[in-house]
Image (cartoon, rainbow, N blue to C red):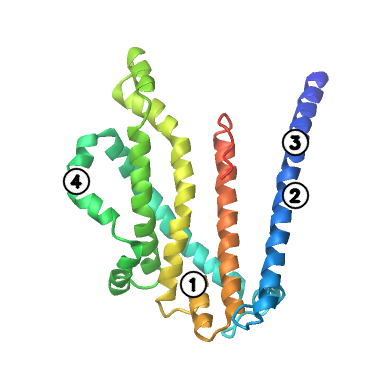
Amino acid sequence: MSTTVYRSRSSKTGRALQEFVSFLPSFGANLVSLVVFMMIWAFASDIFKNPLFPGPQKVIQTFWTLLAKGDLQGVTLFEHSYVSLFRVLLGFIAACVTAIPLGILFGLWKPLYTGTRSVSEPLRFIPPLAWIPLGILFFSGLARYTFLIWIGAFFPLFVLTMNIIANTPPLFVDVGRACGGSRVFIVLRIVIPNALPQIVGAMRMILGPAWMCIMAAEMVTAELVGLGQMIYNYATVLRMDIVIVGMITIGLVGLALNEVFLQIERVLFRHLPKAQL
């Protein structure tokens, strides 16, 4: 018994060490890329010597000031980030709850899609930014942001889910039928499990458009809190260091969300090759 436990622990330790060793080259390459980018940025800033194009040192100082003391309204960078992230996740969850079930339904029953194309397709091609006036008119507060993010994330996720379900390999379905499986059994035990990894990957890709929507929505509203509002407010007074801090923060939060989704995919779908995007 003790030998079996020892071997199991040794195996886990070996796998962890192997993953760490394989991680080092990627970490080193990313670190070099970041250093090169910072050097190019600093060099370009020194050449132009323009107060509207601050260098990395000035931006880093502003970053720590916003993080510790806040902006002119006393709102810290953490508060701006938290509010924007909460709005994005709320609208994104609403889009997932509605788009994925509808995408599965439309993917399983093609006549449902072909019979509603005259409505769904024109709506799909309307840019999310075009919905902002209606969002401002009919909603207020958090509901406004939730609606705009839902619009921006719903249609891409709906279409991707529908196509993923519709493109289920016919061989899988035929095997289920040959084994005597009912339609409900085939859908629940074959079609949806086969599509689930791709649907989760689609959710990760849709986070990008969701962030674009919240930035645009915050820029045209009168609220003081939010990364988009912070960027817009300080762009009007030419505080480009704060603007760049907001842009970098958006990128860092997006990177963190992407990594969280990648880890979720790796835990849920260990039998599949690891996603790297």
Tell me the residue that label 2 is attached to: 28
Give the spatial CA distance, label 3 vs label 4.
51 Å
Residue at (59% x, 38% y) in the render: 266
Give the spatial CA distance, label 4 vs label 2.
51 Å
Which element type, helix, strand or loop, lies under badge 1? helix
Which element type, helix, strand or loop, lies under badge 2? helix
Tell me the residue that label 4 is attached to: 116
Give the spatial CA distance, label 1 vs label 3.
40 Å
For marks 4 and 2, the one nearer the N-term is 2
Q: Which mark is residue 16?
A: 3
For marks 2 and 1, the one nearer the N-term is 2
The answer to whether residue 136 is above or below residue 30 is below
Left or right of residue 107: residue 13:
right
The answer to whether residue 194 is above or below residue 81 is above
Left or right of residue 187: residue 227:
right
Three-letter code for the amino acid on which mark 4 is drawn: Thr
Three-letter code for the amino acid on which mark 2 is drawn: Gly
Which element type, helix, strand or loop, lies under badge 4? loop
Give the spatial CA distance, label 2 vs label 3.
18 Å
Tell me the residue that label 1 is attached to: 228
Three-letter code for the amino acid on which mark 1 is drawn: Gly
Q: Position of residue 53 (x, y in %)?
A: 61, 78
